[in-house]
Image: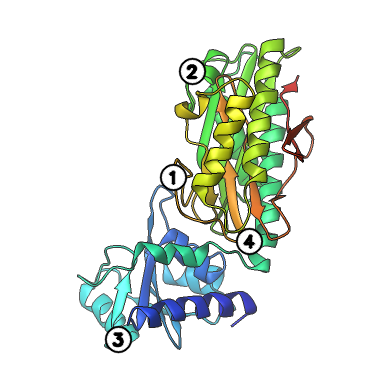
Amino acid sequence: MNDERTTKHRRLVRYLDARGLEGALLGRRCNFSWYTGGAHNHVATACDVGASWLLVTRDRATVLANNIEAPRLREEELAGSGIEVLEYDYADPAAAARAFAEAAGGRKVASDAPSPWGEMPRLDADFDRLRWALTPAETERYRRLCGDTAAAVEATARAVRAGQTECAIAGALAAELAARDCTPWVLLVAADARVAAYRHPLPTAGVVRSYFMLVTCAERGGLIAACTRLAAFGPVPDDLARRHRAVATVDAALISATRPGASLGAIFAEGQAAYAAVGFPDEWRRHHQGGSCGYLPRDVKAGPGETTEALADQAFAWNPSIAGTKSEDTILCTSAGPQLLARPTDWPTVRAEWKGFAVDRPDILAL
């Protein structure tokens, strides 16, 4: 067992001990990828629970998979991991039941989702906290993912031409992500008036004339990076530039407040204060401001009075927006202060400051 999985196994065992459990059955993609260090148990991308399950007890970890999924898991996803794959015939329910009985061995097991093996206790919602503090190995993988995600978004934006449809641009972004071994969980494109009209603009057949926004949450190895970029054909109008400087300041406020022990409610309040200071006091009401992330696009969203506290080595993605503009990247909360997990690669930046904290945020690209 490598250092990363040893750390995770210890966290999980402490969780089991504290709750009088002897095993955890993990079918959710986020939990499966977290414990295995990036393996995938899904087939369909639009699902929360995968096709195979991971049973972790105090002394072992076993994947339960049918004969369709087992070879790929054994030979690719879990090769060299030391995690056993227990295979059963997909068309034989009795074989599946025997496989689970063999792996569970009569232990008291709780699951993170409704399981194929009947009723059993569910893991508490606080099981999610086991994923939040990233190991050094996870952080390095995350940095590479965030860099590749930003590069994909920026390369796509630079190649956009007036007259392209939002759907065509979305397809180009998906291709850039796939070429970097990234899978988009969220893919949003807005052209012209739709940038200001909708905070979550699913791509349409509408064409871009003068201005556009690209947004993605991209996954690799279970980890998910968030990124937004905006670009305009020709000079950026003064009012739009003013709005973007304002939203970058709000982003700086949220980033600067992201410190271990700070509640997400307190971080949110700092963002509210920044919105008021830059002259847009009500814009926070029109879109959530983001929150913690990692193996989900957002684990806990910040909001008024949210008591959940930020942890050291936990990832966050803030996404403040003012009609027509937005600022978003993935950061790491550390005891030494917040860190951007990736900086713009081939993109103009604007220096944003809040109460003595300064950070470079992506500007609007003039094409």
Discs 4, 3 touching: Cβ within 8 Å: no
**Colour option used:** rainbow
Can residue 184 be seen in this snapshot?
A: no
The mark nearer the N terminus, 4 or 3, is 3
According to the picture, the residue beneath numbered tag 4 turns out to be: 313
Report helix, strand or loop for mark 1.
Answer: loop
Image coords of residue 55 (percent x, y): 39, 77
The mark nearer the N terminus, 2 or 3, is 3
According to the picture, the residue beneath numbered tag 2 turns out to be: 197
Q: CA distance from mark 1 to mark 4?
A: 23 Å
Q: CA distance from mark 4 to mark 3?
A: 33 Å
At label 1, the amino acid type is Gly
The mark nearer the N terminus, 1 or 3, is 3
Q: CA distance from mark 2 to mark 3?
A: 54 Å
Residue 363 higher or lower than 296, as above or below: above
Discs 1, 4 touching: Cβ within 8 Å: no
In this orientation, which residue lies closer to the viewer: 320 or 344? 320
Quarter-of-image position of residue 18? bottom left
Quarter that holds the C terminus: top right
Residue 336 higher or lower than 358, as above or below: below
At label 3, the amino acid type is Arg
Q: CA distance from mark 2 to mark 4?
A: 35 Å
According to the picture, the residue beneath numbered tag 1 turns out to be: 305
